[in-house]
Amino acid sequence: MRAVVQNDKKRARCGRAVLACAAAALTCAPLLSGCVAPEETRPAPAHGGAEILSPHSRQAAEHARLVAAARRWGLDGVPLTPPAPPRTKPEITARPGFEVSHQEDWDLPPVFTTIPTKQKIVFLTIDDGSEKDPRFLRMMQDLKVPYTAFLSNYLVKDDYGYFRKMQSYGHTLNNHTLHHPYLPGLSYADQKAEICGMQDIMEKQFGRRPTVFRPPYGNYNRDTLRAAKSCGIKYAPIWNEEVYVDHWEYREDDQRMRRGDIVLTHFRGRSDWNGTMVDDMRRFLNRITREGYAVARLEDYL
């Protein structure tokens, strides 16, 4: 009973102190230090002491982070966010005119330049592996832009770790042969050695044998696709646009992008171009964002 009376008196004193200090709250802080609200009326702290954000607050915070990242990397604006991957994957077939004999009855990997989609998206692919620019990795990670790498062993073998780091960020590594030869000029056996040999390297260095392969220079024949299939390849995408630091090249006569287009660029730097990979990506991202396109992940549609 005495404890209850004392608590009531303490609450009363605290109430009078709060009223007296309303106009000078900072100077009265010591006086109020003993006026602690009953435990059941205090808000529960977040787990581990961290504030729990609502989904809306998290979204706003991420957008603010992306705005800062876009500014840091010199972009005109934030790259657009791609839609969620389709629940049902589109049917991928060889582009008309890009088939080889027995394409369908031998179930050979299709060669294609565009993914069938109604979404305003494109797919970024990067070939070879010569330039290993750490700023490129940071830029694409900061901006959350997906891409697919097609690797040739003779260019990546001096630093597999660079591409393992790329893989750890969620980007897919695919097959681009051991030595980047002109495949139609080789025998079936030699083509198979180039493709399957790279499959072995990919498994050893990166833990998986890809199902996606790009023929060097976009050149292939029926033996190429037969050999690729025997090595476990299901798809052979090439490209519809190629991006350089200072210009674009288009496959189509109207010189414009289309929904679902596959875009090619290369792991190249100042030794080959008048700029860096960061410069190349800045040009690419500014262009597609301005035209209302987002970059989607190729493997999500295969």
Image: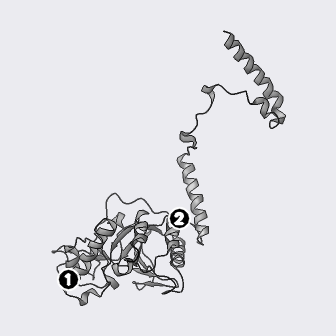
Instruction: Give the residue at mark 1.
Output: 223
Kind of residue at disc 1? Asp
Rendered image: mark on residue 142: 2
112 lies above or below 91:
below
Tell me if mark 1 has few (under 14), some (14-19) or many (20+) residues whose alpha carbon lies within 10 angstroms of its own.
Answer: many
Q: Which residue corresponds to the image point at 35% horizontal and 81% vertical from the top-left?
A: 154
Please state if 142 lies on the left or on the right of 29 as rendered.
left
- Quadrant into which the N terminus falls: top right
Nearest to viewer (mark 1 / mark 2): 2
Please state if 164 lies on the left or on the right of 12 as rendered.
left
Q: Which residue corresponds to the image point at 26% horizontal and 75% vertical from the top-left?
A: 110
Image location (x, y in percent) of residue 148: 39, 71
Kind of residue at disc 2? Asp
Cα separation between marks 1 and 2 = 41 Å
Q: Which residue corresponds to the image point at 40% horizontal and 66% vertical from the top-left?
A: 167
Q: Is residue 62 visible?
A: yes
Please state if 106 lies on the left or on the right of 179 as rendered.
left
Rendered image: mark on residue 121: none
- Quadrant into which the C terminus falls: bottom left
- Res 208 → quadrant: bottom left
Image location (x, y in percent) of residue 91: 28, 67
